Image: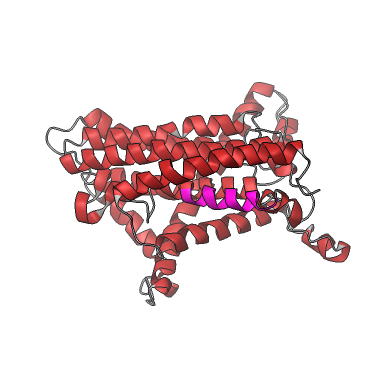
Amino acid sequence: MTPSITNPIGDFIRNLIPIPEISYLINAILCICGICAVAFGSAIILVYMERKVCAHVQCRLGPMRLGFHGCIQTVADTLKLLFKEVYAPDGADKILFYMAPMVLLTAPFMCLAMIPFGPTLQVADISVAVPLIIAVNGFGILGILLGGWASNNKYSLLGSLRSGAQMISYEISFALILLFIVMLSGSASLRGITLSQTGTIADWWIIKAPVIGFIAFIMFLISSTAELNRAPFDIAEAEQELTGGYHTEYNGTAFAMFYLAEYINLVTTSSLATVCFLGGFLPPCIGIASVDSILNLVPGVIWFFGKVLVMIWIYMMLRWTYVRPRVDQLMSLEWKFLLPVNLLLLVLGALFISFGWIIK
């Protein structure tokens, strides 16, 4: 039961406990705890970060009263949600009503297990990670559809149907961009994609494939923002039309799980962008030996989360900068613009590989 990627902690447990089944079980529990720590810990931090980014974009201060610059405001809000009464409206399908947020949380946790956070920090190095990520994203769509349909509320149902149509549509472009990176790197493993960018910044796929790499990155930003149901593409919960959208009837812990899923998905998507376009856990070397030797001293996990933080900041700036389009404009953007461009990118990527135009 020796894993393909070894870790000092895992090696220590395997050496300490000679029974393979028990050591494997302990390591599996540690992996689950690690993924939960990344997911829940980052969500609490990102709620605070979102409020501060929003406030500064709009020339305000944001939370200031609880803790230093309001740093424990999120903790107070979390406690409030945990202790609020949880109930379902009359006529709701209670089993599906409470199952929906748990189904929605399934996809980001499965994706996080495949992300290489560092050279030795990855739960599962799967050779078909990209197709698997595309497949499990369907859980997110299913959770939202279940939440809206089971609520017995016309606004929730309409919001969930809008969200389902939006996410299924943009899922196509999202998948095409990931397949574009698979084609360029020659690997469907996230670790393989990361290692295909070994070298300097010029070897990151955003630069290594001239022009089309940057265009693919922009397409990824647009399609993933729609996949996340975040503004300006949050048509599913447009306040002026649908009240709160698919989670209008949710409260307390159940609503907190929907809220939590949004921010864990934000971390997952930012991690995918980091792996596919920004070199993953690799340092941003510039080709100068003296500088690169210093950059290589920094652990890969720090570089990884630093890049993820930059990506999250970009998503937040997009949210608080652009206005929300109409639902017909949003769908037209996918079917009339993004999809043709992404199909063209695949063709250009094949030509780049065939004629050796990739920067080496």
Placement of the N terminus among the 4 image quadrants = top right
The colour scheme used here is secondary structure
Q: Position of residue 267 (x, y in %)?
A: 51, 49
Q: Main secondary structure of the magenta part?
A: helix
199 relative to 278 in the view: left or right: right
Say which of 75 and 343 sits in front: 343
114 relative to 239 in the view: left or right: right
The answer to whether residue 127 is magenta is: no
| Number of numbered markers | 0
Q: Residue furthest left?
A: 90
Residue 191, can we see it?
no
The answer to whether residue 214 is magenta is: yes
Q: Position of residue 115 (x, y in %)?
A: 60, 41
Say which of 62 and 246 sits in front: 246
Q: Position of residue 116 (x, y in %)?
A: 65, 42
Which portion, as a residue range, is magenta? 210-222
Say which of 31 and 111 sits in front: 111
90 relative to 75 in the view: left or right: left
Quarter of the rendering containing residue 157: top left
Q: Position of residue 353 (x, y in %)?
A: 73, 38
Quarter of the rendering containing residue 56: bottom left
Q: Residue at x 70, y 48 (%)?
A: 209
Q: Residue at x 23, y 55 (%)?
A: 239
Say which of 43 and 129 sits in front: 129
Q: Residue at x 66, y 56 (%)?
A: 302
Q: Image height check: is 217 above or below 94? A: below
Residue 139, can we see it?
yes
Q: Residue furthest right?
A: 289
